[in-house]
Image: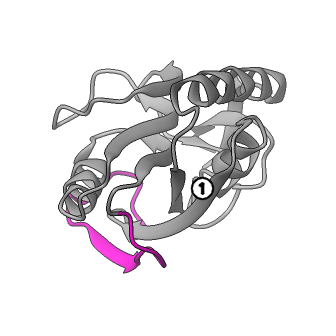
Amino acid sequence: MRPGRVLVDEESISVRLAEMGDEITADYAGKDLLLVAVLKGAFMVVADLARHIRLPIDIDFMAVSSYGVATQTSGVVRILKDLDQEIADRHVLIVEDIIDSGLTLDYLRRNLEVRQPASLEIATLLLKRGIQRVPIDVKYVGFEIPPDFVVGYGLDLVGKMRNLPYIAVMEED
């Protein structure tokens, strides 16, 4: 497999993250906001999104796995790295690179809700249309995309191609 056509270009990503940053700035003014990036894929999204949020924010990271070496989720979620800080009574915004089946994010949301944050919302750069297996309420969506396997801007194929500055559809060789 190799990256094929560009689905979302670098400039479009930058513009949309700036817009999302403006929305988040307005929505969380005066609140203690913690961004929780889901590793590894969301590291680029959270870094660029955070630069557009004009508030004092905190950032923490979680690592979860539901793929292994597959290109579709297994549905079995494991927490590989938990948060370093408490979230009780804080406003938490989960930052994802992509939401497809929603199973991993649903598990993560339920895991964080029991820790009693003041609020818990979700931001994602990409939302695959029509393939969610559980309902997920996403407050901030960068782009809705078709259910293709994509790489770039943090998204990978077996750990590679995260460094592409755009989102590309994977194609067969």
State yes or no: residue 71 in magenta. Answer: yes
Q: 158 above or below 118?
A: below
- Which of the colour schemes (rainbow, by chain, secondary structure, one colour) is used? one colour
Q: Is residue 80 magenta?
A: yes
Whether residue 153 is visible to the viewer of this picture, yes or no, is no
Q: Residue at x 23, y 58 (%)?
A: 116
Q: Quadrant of residue 50?
A: top right
Residue 71 x %, y %? 41, 53
Q: Residue at x 22, y 63 (%)?
A: 111
- The residue indicated by pointer 1 is 156
52 or 168: nearer the viewer:
52
- Looking at the image, residue 21 sits to the left or right of residue 164; the answer is left
Residue 164 lies, with reference to residue 160, above or below; the image says above
Q: Which residues are magenta?
A: 69-87
Residue 44's x, y, as percent?
70, 51
Type of amino acid at the residue the image marks with label 1: Asp
Secondary structure, magenta segment, majority class = loop
Name the residue nearer the viewer: 33 or 1: 33
- Classify residue 21 as left or right of residue 123: right
Query: With 122 as the anchor, is 4 left or right in this view?
Result: right
Report the residue at 22% width, 55% height from top.
113
- The quadrant of the rendering that contains the C terminus is top right
Residue 96 % position (x, y): 49, 46
Q: Residue furthest front?
A: 30
- The answer to whether residue 143 of the structure is visible from this angle is yes
Q: Is residue 114 above or below residue 154?
A: below
Q: Is residue 42 left or right of residue 105?
A: right
Give me the residue at 51% from left, 42% from top: 31
Q: How many tags in the picture?
A: 1
Disc 1 crowd, CA 10 A, few/some/many (<14, 14-19, 20+): some
